[in-house]
């Protein structure tokens, strides 16, 4: 579904309130302006899957442009969302990207890119309520790139995270070529950072850890390991509880776009690792317990060459293919299957794939066709309807009726 060019003072383009067990996928939000929001809201929900959402490309003079928001929601899994292309000229305390409050989130394979504002958060996660002490943010394979927030004053940092109940988990993220007058990232309370690339020449500093909160008098453990930082140090207001292991400081990650022509800083492909990158095979030696996804941001194997890389891309990796069984079973009962055209014809008209198969004996139930992509993800299931001859026989009509039918089911042909 696409929602584009929507306008409202009081409502939002799409929102879910007090829902259980929902799956939201394949949505596009472009150039919408609502009450603070331009995309999707998930509020007071339980059991949520959000997959494949593109939101943004909105310009406003006085509106918050939140492309994705969660509030007081639990068991939320978010995969492959892109928040990009927003711009606002309002100069005080704006939300211009992803906003998450008091929610339990697993966030994977997503991008925040090419947003522009004077004083705004491009990404915020905050949980400081005792009622949600068990909630956390577990984030991997995120790419924050080419965002420009020129003068933060009300906003402490364009990327801001805080959880007073749990250790935030940031694994294999890339934060690069963003511009701001202060630190690009601030984390309050506890956090574990692993395999991060933070390289932002246009920012004053890369990372600020506020692990002592004067308002409560509490201090928190923070760690940064196997990560690359442009700066010479990690700023921390309580360094006695900071642990650093095997970080690369004052370094350039040597992205592919810096080495090879044809890439722009506004393109995600720019931030793949070149063969010269010091981030290759420099990630955490033991990834057990990190809850990493099986693929990187490009859909390739997340761990390659027996060692994980820093950042959201894995250098030299091949496309991830996942199946439940280690070996595909052979078709039973001499089933014959043919698929054509193969490869699919690339024409200006909608393409169709025909699947012909024959069964050696009548099945107990109607056949089901399941189609998987090269990642092992199921993309379509088709339950075939009953044949014409069978319906004739059940109706008590002439058994002499014979018909060889070729039926197209959403691009799938069944011949009987």
Image: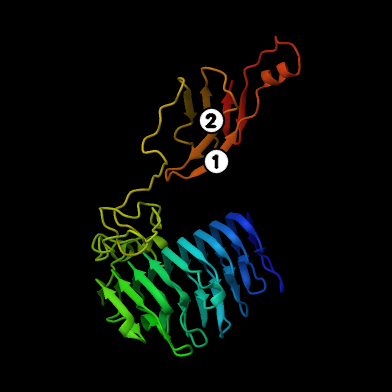
The alpha-carbon separation of the residues under discs 2 and 1 comes to 14 Å
Q: Who is closer to the viewer here, 395 or 262?
A: 395
Secondary structure found at label 2: strand
**Rendered view: 212 above or below 254:** below
Tell me residue 193's x, y (percent): 36, 71
Tell me residue 188's x, y (percent): 44, 80
Q: Residue furthest top?
A: 400
Q: Residue furthest right?
A: 396
Q: Residue at x 40, y 56 (%)?
A: 293
Secondary structure found at label 1: strand
N-term mark: 2 or 1: 2
Quadrant placement of the C terminus: top right
Mark 2 against mark 1, which lies toward the viewer? 1
Tell me residue 374's x, y (percent): 42, 43
Q: Residue at x 52, y 75 (%)?
A: 127
Q: In this rendering, does residue 117 appear at all?
A: no
Label 1 near label 2: C-beta < 8 Å? no
Q: Who is closer to the viewer here, 163 or 151?
A: 163
Task: Specify few, some or many for label 1: CA neighbours under 10 Å numbering under 14, 14-19, or 20 or more.
Answer: few
Colouring rule applied to residues = rainbow
Left of 18 or right of it: where is 219?
left
Q: Residue under circle 1? A: 380
Task: Specify few, some or many for label 2: CA neighbours under 10 Å numbering under 14, 14-19, or 20 or more.
Answer: many
The mark tally for this picture is 2
Q: Residue under circle 2? A: 354
Q: Which mark is residue 358?
A: none
Tell me residue 340's x, y (percent): 49, 30
Q: Residue at x 52, y 36 (%)?
A: 370
Q: In this rendering, does residue 245 appear at all?
A: yes
**Rendered view: 34 above or below 80:** below
Quadrant placement of the N terminus: bottom right
**Rendered view: 275 above or below 136:** above
């Amino acid at each position: 579904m696409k929602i584009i060019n929507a306008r409202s003072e009081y409502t939002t383009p799409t929102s879910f309130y007090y829902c259980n067990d929902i799956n939201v996928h394949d949505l596009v939000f472009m150039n919408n302006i609502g009450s603070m929001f331009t995309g999707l809201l998930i509020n007071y929900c339980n059991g949520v899957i959000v997959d494949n959402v593109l939101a943004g490309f909105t310009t406003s003079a006085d509106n918050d442009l939140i492309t994705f928001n969660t509030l007081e929601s639990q068991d939320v899994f978010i995969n492959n969302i892109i928040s990009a292309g927003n711009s606002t000229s309002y100069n005080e305390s704006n939300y211009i990207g992803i906003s998450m409050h008091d929610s339990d989130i697993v966030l994977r394979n997503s991008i925040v890119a090419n947003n522009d504002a004077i004083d705004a958060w491009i990404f915020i996660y905050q949980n400081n309520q005792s009622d949600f002490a068990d909630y956390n943010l577990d984030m991997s394979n995120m790419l924050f790139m080419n965002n420009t927030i020129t003068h933060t004053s009300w906003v402490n940092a364009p990327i801001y995270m805080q959880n007073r109940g749990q250790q935030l988990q940031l694994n294999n993220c890339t934060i690069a070529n963003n511009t701001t007058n202060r630190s690009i990232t601030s984390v309050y309370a506890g956090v574990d950072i692993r395999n991060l690339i933070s390289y932002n020449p246009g920012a004053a500093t890369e990372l600020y850890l506020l692990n002592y909160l004067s308002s409560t008098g509490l201090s928190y453990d923070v760690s940064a390991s196997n990560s690359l930082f442009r700066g010479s140090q990690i700023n921390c207001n309580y360094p006695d509880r900071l642990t650093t292991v095997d970080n690369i400081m004052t370094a350039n990650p040597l992205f592919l776009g810096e080495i090879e022509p044809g890439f722009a800083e506004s393109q995600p492909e720019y931030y793949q690792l070149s063969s010269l990158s010091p981030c290759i095979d420099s990630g955490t030696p033991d990834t057990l317990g990190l809850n990493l996804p099986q693929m990187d941001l490009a859909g390739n194997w997340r761990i390659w060459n027996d060692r994980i890389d820093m950042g959201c891309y894995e250098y030299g990796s091949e496309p991830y293919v996942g199946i439940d069984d280690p070996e595909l079973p052979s078709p039973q009962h001499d089933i014959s299957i043919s698929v054509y055209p193969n490869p699919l014809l690339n024409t200006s008209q909608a393409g169709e794939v025909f699947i012909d198969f024959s069964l050696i004996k009548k099945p107990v139930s109607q056949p089901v066709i399941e189609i998987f992509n090269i990642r092992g993800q199921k993309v379509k299931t088709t339950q075939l309807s009953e044949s014409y001859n069978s319906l004739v026989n059940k109706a008590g009509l002439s058994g002499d009726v014979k018909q060889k039918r070729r039926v197209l089911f959403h691009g799938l042909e069944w011949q009987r």
